[in-house]
Amino acid sequence: MPDKHFVIPRQDINREDFTSSIPDFNRRSEFMKTDMGHKCIITNIVRLTEQEKLFKLRIIDPHEQGIFRFKPGQFLMLELPGYGDVPISISSSNSNHEFLELCIRKAGHVTSALFTLSEGAHVAIRGPFGSSFPMDEMAGNNVLLIAGGLGIAPLRAPLFWISEHRERFLNVAVLYGVKEPSQLLFTYQFDEWEKINHITLHTIAEHAEAGWRGKSGMITDLFQDISIDSEHTYAIVCGPPVMFKVVCSYLDNLGIPMNRMFVSLERRMHCGMGKCCRCMVGSTFTCVDGPVFDYWSVMNLKEAI
């Protein structure tokens, strides 16, 4: 009986049909597209603090770079070969199709390895994944962005969006709190936000250090410095989960509806696909249905925060 030979046609995985158009990233059916890996080169690394660095990446393949798109609030899976991958919120402008910026805190096995890299190193990304902040819905209103610690990193993308469409928004304010003044991130952009983009910035540190001339206390103390028109204000809150209840309860008391407060549960992200189930809250996969939720939805997710 003659042998049967099966020939599998060679395929270029980087040029299959699913890469020919820009996908709708918020649909579950699009996972095959967003889970495609992109090889990247690190073009710049900026040390922000002792624990955080800003990595600028460029997708190497021009075709893949041309179709890659994301929305403010979405995240990537960043892979370092031989070490694994980690979910990281995108911290750059979604109008910049050449470079991506990721603010990374040295906190574990993979991120510690990333901190040893230098410019020119190669990594890979998958994504983007998850839901995003409804920037178009917020147009025509005031926007209040509240960040605690590393929470300023995912807020940077909506800040870029607002800056690039500043005429579409009314008053915009950023409330930014840290434990110590030395932990403030992106201080080199503060003047740009205030003087060029007309975004009011208020910072506070729980513990004052020598030379600190700013305000000391909890982030809710900053509400004393601003006036809020609750009927025409949206709020975005990013930071440690323990901060959500305190801040959002305060906003609720001021009259801002829960469906106009948005939080990012990006710290619950794991595989990005809802496969590992480590992101589950009840029956909800925060990787798939989040990381951005309105506060009403979060209050109805048991143990979400």
Image: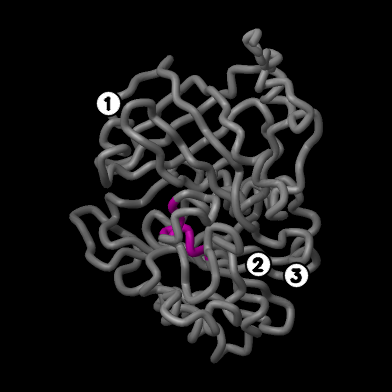
Taking 198 as reference, is 298 above or below it? below
**Quadrant location of the N terminus in the rendered image:** top right
Taking 201 as reference, is 260 above or below it? below
Residue carrying label 1? 116
Q: Is residue 20 visible?
A: yes
Q: Secondary structure at mark 2?
A: strand
User: Is the residue marked by circle 3 packed among few (<14), some (14-19), or many (20+) residues within 10 Å?
Assistant: some
Residue carrying label 3? 141
Which is closer to the viewer, label 1 or label 2?
A: 1
Which is closer to the viewer, label 3 or label 1?
A: 1
Region rendered in magenta = 264-270
Q: Secondary structure at mark 1?
A: loop
- Seen at 46% across and 78% down, the residue is 247
The answer to whether the residues at label 2 and label 3 have Cβ atoms under 8 Å apart is yes
Amino acid marked by disc 3? Asn
In the image as oriented, which residue stretches furthest toward the top? 2
> Where's residue 45, x and y in %?
40, 27
In the image as oriented, which residue stretches furthest toward the front? 1
Residue 267 versus residue 203: which sits nearer the camera? 267
User: Is the residue marked by circle 1 packed among few (<14), some (14-19), or many (20+) residues within 10 Å?
Assistant: few
Residue carrying label 2? 143
- Seen at 55% across and 75% down, the residue is 226
Kindly report the distance in space between the C-alpha atoms of the residues bearing marks 1 and 2.
38 Å
Amino acid marked by disc 1? Thr
Residue 89 versus residue 56: which sits nearer the camera? 89
